Each structure stands twice: as structure tokens, then as C-alpha cells.
Amino acid sequence: MIDRGYYGRFGGAYLPEILVATFDELVDTFENAKSDPAFWKEYTDIMSTYSCRPTPLSFAENLTGHFQGARFFIKREDLNHTGAHKANNVMGQGLLVKRMGKSRVIAETGAGQHGVATATMAAKFGFECTIYMGEVDVERQRPNVFWMERLGAEVIPVREGARILKDAINEAFRDWVTNMDTTHYVLGTVCGPHPFPEMVAYFQSIIGKEARRQILEREARLPTRIYACVGGGSNAMGIFSGFFDDPVELVGVEAAGQGLESGQHAARLSSEDASIGVAQGYKTYFLQDNDGQMKETHSVAAGLDYVGVSPILANLKETGRVRFEAATDREVVDAMSLTMQKEGLIPALESAHAFAQAFKEAPTLSKEEIVLINQSGRGDKDIFTVADAFADPKWQEFIKNKAEAYHA
Amino acid sequence: MLESYLRARLKEKQLLLMTHIVLGYPTFEDSFKIIEAMVEAGVDLMELQIPFSEPIADGSVILHANQKSLAGGATVKKCIDFAEKVARAFDIPFLFMSYYNILFKYGVDRFLSAMTEVGIQGSIVPDLPPEEGQDYLEAMQKYELSPIFIFSPTTPDERMKYLASFGRSFIYCVARKGVTGAKTSFSEQLDRYLARCRKATDLPLALGFGVKDKADIEFLKGKADIAVIGTQTIRLIDKEGAEAVGGFIKSLRQLPGSS
Ligand SMILES: Cc1ncc(COP(=O)(O)O)c(C=O)c1O
């Protein structure tokens, strides 16, 4: 094994022997790309012509007025092609797949955003594509399943375990250990065995690089705080990494689900319920029992509903560089609603966690201060979940009529 | 100790048989009966899998056995207590197989000390390469247990030698890519792979993944030292119940030319 990638006591590469050679090849390819000055240019070129980079930084004037505290700025990752920051990682890994000469990509997905991004990249680059998705998530993110299939990907619903993100990751690994000669596993977040945490953070760092330049250009000073939601941690690492050397407070927001006391949550770094373990190829905080068996997690946002968390963030929690908080399902739906009404922005349920926490803290800040929120994705995909949360009667009628029409 | 047992047996038999079961599947009582039948049918050593919620290297048959065992209330403590009972009752060596988190959460030293106390002779931890296993390897040495390392067809010669330098008693050679339970073709390619394994180490070689019947066993004679039967017995238990296991293992043993 070439390198094992530790961040403090977290990370590593706990690999079955069959995959060691594949990881060595991946580490090699990634290292070569990183040290090739043309590679980052190729990457930013494709992100500016195929996706929408640099994504804008929006001043949220009405939210600022509403809370009478700090000035809100929003980094608009929702304006990426396919509607989330996931495109940053996926296009980058796609370029590496070309370098490795492989012809097929596989991915796990929770919210479906990473799956759609991967299916899109596969269509553009001409790769075969298989997406693993927990059966529970297939149900709650149906619009994204539809698009993945239209884009030419095969979507395999995973019926094992809790039938959510972690189970989709396990199935993707099972595919990979069989097909690694032709296939690259496009892991969707800053988790898993080395080099994935480093590699995904590298591609997502484009968010923070842009955001730092943009805020300095516009306001000529740095924000006081930055908020990002944390599933695996990729959008958070993306924006935070631009500000590690600055006097800026970084806040990662996890899913408190039905409340931290309820046990129905996915808070690994902001609750006392998680402990250090090794699973899915890396060492970090997991929501697990005393025997080391993984627990069920809960969040209204499929993309945050995960038992583990980035080893890089676990280390940043220990060093104190990043503060971790959690927002409940209820707070998140309210924050989403307010953001829509005040700003005409529809954050994904995942991203709305960052908004919810910023709203809780904003009134304590002065009007001179700046708060930056990472809107990791757009909320269209959540139409069914959000319609249910609002118990929208017109939507329900529409669905009933639609169902009847199919019956006829 | 395990290695000398294996070498002594290999003087009498050309190919030894190692079987694998998931503890607590379908129940601990069944596990006991299955082990009894296997020992009775002439199995030479056994791996006892402690179930884990995320068994990433296992295919659907063993994955389901893991899940059902956990749903039935299996815990690490129950597995260790059970291992003590069988190690005392039966006169063959037993190994633990599990994923690293099980050992890590229990405390690696505490786990290996418990293994020693209950009479388990070694362990297979498929997601723990030696690079990540310093604590484990040191404790294995302290307790004089056998860490079993894995070769795969994608492992380069150099790395095979590196892995063998940490292994004791035997090497577990995975027959092919993929997870447990899929089909293996017993072909010339497998021959060449086993020859490569043989060159890399003097330790006895076990071959597992996809071994399912007499023909496969016959093929392995003279090429490997131990045949590993895993998924096939679990499939049989799923289909015909725990009682069917003894007859199946005997049928593998009753071969012309086998002693
Ligand atoms: C819009 C959006 N935000 C956030 C996440 C969480 O992932 P991460 O923490 O890696 O950014 C997801 C995952 O699916 C997502 O779709």
C-alpha cells in the first residue's frame, strides 16, 4: 500500500486485500494529476463550460433584514449543473477515470444528487454507469431516480440493512471488488478509505477558493462565520478549506432528525451518541452500539442520513478548528420555508440544515459581521418530502388525479 | 501450535478441509449442531464468523446470515462464550473470522486475550491489512495466536511475500475477485495463481471462495493444502436445514484416492 492517509487518529485504508492494487493505482493516478499543472486547469475549464463555475455569491438582503443581525451571504452551489456541489467531485473523478482508461463507473447515492451527477458525467464521457441506492431513498427521492435512469444509468435499489446510504456504499464496494479492472467507484463524499477523503476534498476545494475571493472582492473583509451541512462532509470541507488559515469560525451542521434525545438522528460529531470505529474502509466516529454494530440513523434529508463522517472533519472537531451543531427536521423545514419566501431560493433539505443553524445564531451577531452559508444544492428533488411536510392539499389532489390517470 | 497440527495432518491427508459458519445462524443451538456434524464428518479446522452489520467482503448469502444472527440477538460476548463451549467440546482447531470493528470496539488486546482464554487459535480479519494492524499483530504475537492473512489474484508477488511475513500457520488464498458466494471457475488460471502463492511462502495454503463440491476438491489436490467451504454449507442450511450439513461434508470426503 502506497499511502494510508491519516488525519490525526482518523482515516486510514482498511481494505480487503483484493482491492489493495486498485487503490494503489488510484493513489498513483491522483498524485500524478495533482502534480500536473495542466490538470487543475482542465478541471476548472470543464467546470466553467459544462457546469456553472464560478457559482455566484448572493447577498441575502431580505433574510438579513428579517433577523436584524449579521449580513447573510449565500454560496450558490445549487447553480451547479445537476443542482448540487456533487458535480465538482464527480467531474474531477471522471477526468481521473479517463486517465486510468476505465470504461465503467459505479456510485452510491442517498439524496440522489450524487447519483444524478455521476450518471450525467458518465453520459458525457461515454462510461457505463450503475448507481446503488437504498430502497428507502429510492422512495423518497423518486424524481432523481427517474433522471438517473433517463440519463442511461442502471439504478439498483439496495434492500440490505437499513436500506439507506451506508448500505448503498456496501453494495457499491461489493460490485467494485468484482469489476475493478473496468470500473471506478466514484465515492460521493470525503469518507471511505484513502485516497477518497483527500481526493474528494481536493475537488470540492474549488468552492472555498471561489468563495474567499468573492467575499473579499465584494466586502473587502472576511466573514465571521461559515455554515455548511454535514452528511459525509464534502460540501463542508469544500467551503471550509478556503478559510482554514483565516480567523473565521467554521460551523458544520448535522442532522438532529427528531431531536438528539430521541435517538432518531444522524449527529455523529455534535452528539454524545457516536464513538470511534472502523467500517467502510476507514476510521472515524460512527453511530454504533457497544459491540460495534452500526445503528439506524434518521434525517428528513436523505443525503445527511449516514452513520459515519469524514475523518478529516473528525480530526478538525478534535483540534477544535470546526464547531459542530445539529438542526432538527422541523427546524430545517421551517428554515427552507423562510428562505423560499424571503429570498426566492429553494435550498435542498440537506443545505437547509446550514440555514437553520445560521438563523438560530444570527441574532447574536452584530450588523457589521458577515455570515456565509453554503447552499450545497437546490430543493426541487425534495418536492415529495416537502409537500408532505407542509401537507399541501393541492399537491395531494394532483397526485391522486395523476394516479387515477395511470389506472385508466 | 496450529501450524504443527496442520503439518501433521497433511502427512496423512493430501488436502485438509476447513469450514466456515456464521455464529448464531440460524440460532446458537443450530450452530452447535452444525459444528458437531462437521467435526463428526471429518472437518480438520473451522472458522467461526462473529456477525457484523457491515460485512463488506461477503456476498448476499453470508450477509443475510450475519443480519439474521444479529436480529436474533447475537452479541460479541455470546459468540465468545459459545466459542469456549465448542473449543472444549471438539478436538479440532477453531479460528475467529470477523471484521476489524468487532475487535476494535471490544479492545484489540482484550479481544485477543479472550480468544486465548477460550481456546481459539487464530483469526482472519479481512478488512485489516498489516499496514493498519500494528496493535493487532503485536497482541497476536504476545498471545501466540495465528494471524491469518489473505492473498488475492490481484496481489503482486512482492506483496505476497510482504503479507506472508506477518502470517502464521497458513495463508488464506482467495480464489478470485469478488465477494463470497459467487461462482469460481476451477481452471488453469487458478492453477497458475496457486503456483504463484506457493512461490511466495512456505506456509500451507488454504483456498477459499466458491469451493462447492467434490469436483472442486478434487481439482485442488496437490495444488492447495486446505480447501475452504463457506457459502455452500450456509446455502444448504437455508434450503434443507442444519441436518443436511453432515451428509454434505461426508460426501466431499468420500472420494476415490482420498484418505
Ligand atoms: C444537496 C446536498 N447537500 C449535502 C449533501 C451531503 O453530503 P456532503 O456532506 O458530502 O456534502 C448531499 C448528499 O447527498 C446533498 O445532495
Image: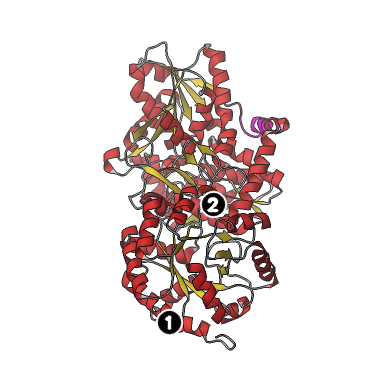
Label placed on residue B237: none
Q: Chain of mark 2?
A: B
Question: Considering depth in this image, is B1 or B217 the residue closer to the camera?
Answer: B1
Which residue does the image show at 60% across and 72% down from the upper left? B224
- The answer to whether mark 1 is within 8 Å of ligand 1 is no
Which residue does the image show at 26% across and 40% down from the upper left? A261
Tell which residue pokes out farthest to the left in this image: A261
Residue that numbered label 1 is attached to: B246
The quarter of the displayed image where residue A349 is located: top left
Residue B54 screen position, x and y as percent? 44, 55
**Amino acid on which disc 1 is placed:** Gly
- Looking at the rendered structure, whether the residues under marks 2 and 1 are on a common chain is answered as yes
Residue that numbered label 2 is attached to: B130
**Can residue A93 be seen from the camera position used here?**
yes
The stretch drawn in magenta includes residue B197: no
Going from N to C along the chain, the mark reached first, 2 or 1, is 2
Residue B210 lies, with reference to residue B66, above or below; the image says below
Question: Considering depth in this image, is B245 or B12 the residue closer to the camera?
Answer: B12
Q: Magenta segment range? A: A42-56
Question: Considering depth in this image, is B78 or A379 the residue closer to the camera?
Answer: B78
